[in-house]
Image (spheres, rainbow, N blue to C red):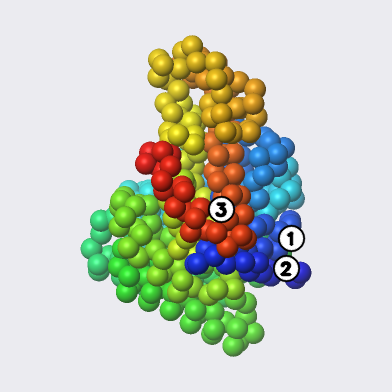
């Protein structure tokens, strides 16, 4: 297969099983991407990521550009060599930081100016400079610079974010040149279906113009601006229509979502890829995912419980340690507690998506979805 070829191996309803080729190997969807913000998935070594079955690891352009700097990462041989991870990787653009750090930044048509959260230094990014940074980092997939609208927001604000994100998408695609890296465009539009479909239309128009002039196309598409404060039912009012408005021959990536039930439902709507800090962040807070729902490991009922976290789980944590021991670690604020729970929570989501793919390949995704929605776990996520 050629670099960045995407093959649809099967469908089941709107759910899809894709294979996508990168310079660091292929990945298969549906899939969840662990988040390694600063070139590390907190508490998880690269060899453990491989053992868990992680296919793509995400890193954060904003944080790596600030510390240690994109030039240093490039000098080390790129993000893969820097962190000793040889599988496919994706860098976001820092667009979410534009959203989440709104008190420290200023947007204009040409780019964004912000204060570094590390030392207060004033930093200026244009779409072209953002592409240069992501090319230096060297992940297999880069994301366009965009503006994510909060929820709630006025229609006028969201429409302006679509305008700005579309203009920046055009500039990112024109500036992006690294041949062993592809660029994903990002759909915005808040909870307004017409604005989201307009965002899709503009991305496809930008791509058509680029190809007509001998330029490149988008390697896939992110669906941004969800999970920013709205409830999940509000998101699902528009998500499926938006996902299926995107080209069938490339991946659709729902950004920043890691709730198990949301993942299972979104696959049914035609979404292929997901990422979120949820499994590792909640692990460090003492929370475990399980087939029975969330478990707060600080709870006294686990003090003398010598069973695994989840009897149906085959991860390293569940096959070697008990609930009582993990509760002890969490209560004592021992580092190992967060590590073991992170291993388990990541395994839970990665395995859930592996099972989802098997259901698509068997043309039985609706049955898989209905079984999950009827489970006790679904009611707790």
The residue where tag 3 is placed is 356
The residue where tag 1 is placed is 23
Pick the residue in front: 210 or 358: 358
Please identify the quadrant where the C terminus is shown: top left
Pick the residue in front: 254 or 213: 254
- In the rendered image, which quarter is residue 52 located in? top right
Q: Earlier in the sequence, mark 2 or mark 1?
A: 2
- The residue carrying pointer 3 sits among few (fewer than 14), some (14 to 19) or many (20 or more) residues within 10 Å by Cα, namely many
Pick the residue in front: 317 or 73: 317
Can residue 141 be seen in this snapshot? no
Name the residue at 54% across, 85% down: 209
- The residue carrying pointer 1 sits among few (fewer than 14), some (14 to 19) or many (20 or more) residues within 10 Å by Cα, namely some
In the image, is 177 to the left or to the right of 302? right
Report the number of numbered marks.
3
Q: Residue furthest top?
A: 304
Image height check: is 304 above or below 321? above
Q: Earlier in the sequence, mark 1 or mark 3?
A: 1
In the image, is 140 to the left or to the right of 38? right
What separation in Å lies between label 2 and label 3 (alpha carbons)? 25 Å
Q: Are marks 2 and 1 in contact (CB under 8 Å)?
A: yes
Name the residue at 34% across, 58% down: 235
Image height check: is 306 above or below 86? above
Please identify the quadrant where the N terminus is shown: bottom right
From the top left corner, tell me how far across and down residue 240 is, in percent: 41, 66
- The residue carrying pointer 2 sits among few (fewer than 14), some (14 to 19) or many (20 or more) residues within 10 Å by Cα, namely some
Name the residue at 25% across, 68% down: 156
Q: Secondary structure at mark 2?
A: loop
The residue where tag 2 is placed is 3
């Amino acid at each position: 297969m050629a670099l960045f070829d995407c093959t649809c191996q099967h469908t089941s309803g709107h759910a899809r099983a894709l294979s996508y080729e990168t310079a660091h190997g292929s990945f298969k969807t549906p899939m969840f991407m662990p988040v390694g913000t600063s070139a590390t998935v907190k508490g998880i070594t690269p060899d453990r990521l491989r053992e868990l079955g992680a296919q793509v690891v995400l890193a954060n352009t904003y944080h790596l550009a600030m510390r240690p700097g994109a030039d240093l990462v490039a000098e080390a041989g790129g993000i893969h060599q820097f962190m000793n991870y040889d599988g496919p990787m994706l860098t976001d653009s820092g667009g979410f930081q534009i959203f989440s750090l709104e008190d420290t930044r200023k947007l204009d048509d040409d780019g964004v100016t912000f204060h570094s959260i590390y030392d207060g230094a004033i930093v200026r990014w244009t779409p072209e400079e953002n592409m240069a940074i992501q090319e230096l980092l060297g992940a297999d997939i880069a994301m366009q610079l965009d503006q994510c609208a909060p929820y709630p927001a006025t229609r006028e604000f969201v429409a302006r974010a679509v305008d700005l994100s579309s203009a920046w998408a055009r500039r990112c695609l024109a500036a992006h040149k690294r041949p062993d890296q592809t660029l994903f465009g990002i759909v915005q539009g808040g909870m307004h279906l017409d604005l989201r479909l307009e965002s899709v239309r503009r991305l496809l128009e930008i791509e058509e113009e680029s190809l007509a002039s001998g330029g490149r196309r988008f390697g896939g598409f992110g669906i941004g601006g969800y999970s920013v404060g709205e409830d999940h039912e509000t998101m699902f009012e528009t998500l499926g229509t938006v996902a299926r408005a995107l080209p069938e021959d490339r991946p659709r990536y729902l950004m920043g979502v890691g709730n198990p039930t949301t993942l299972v439902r979104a696959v049914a709507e035609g979404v292929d890829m997901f990422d979120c800090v949820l499994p590792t962040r909640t692990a460090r807070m003492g929370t475990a995912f399980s087939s029975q729902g969330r478990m707060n490991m600080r709870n006294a009922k686990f003090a003398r419980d010598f069973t695994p976290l989840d009897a149906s789980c085959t991860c390293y944590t569940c096959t070697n340690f008990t609930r009582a021991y993990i509760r002890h670690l969490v209560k004592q604020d021992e580092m190992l507690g967060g590590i073991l729970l992170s291993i388990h929570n990541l395994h839970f989501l990665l395995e859930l998506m592996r099972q989802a793919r098997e259901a698509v390949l068997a043309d039985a995704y609706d049955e898989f979805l209905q079984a999950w929605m009827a489970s006790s776990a679904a009611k707790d996520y």
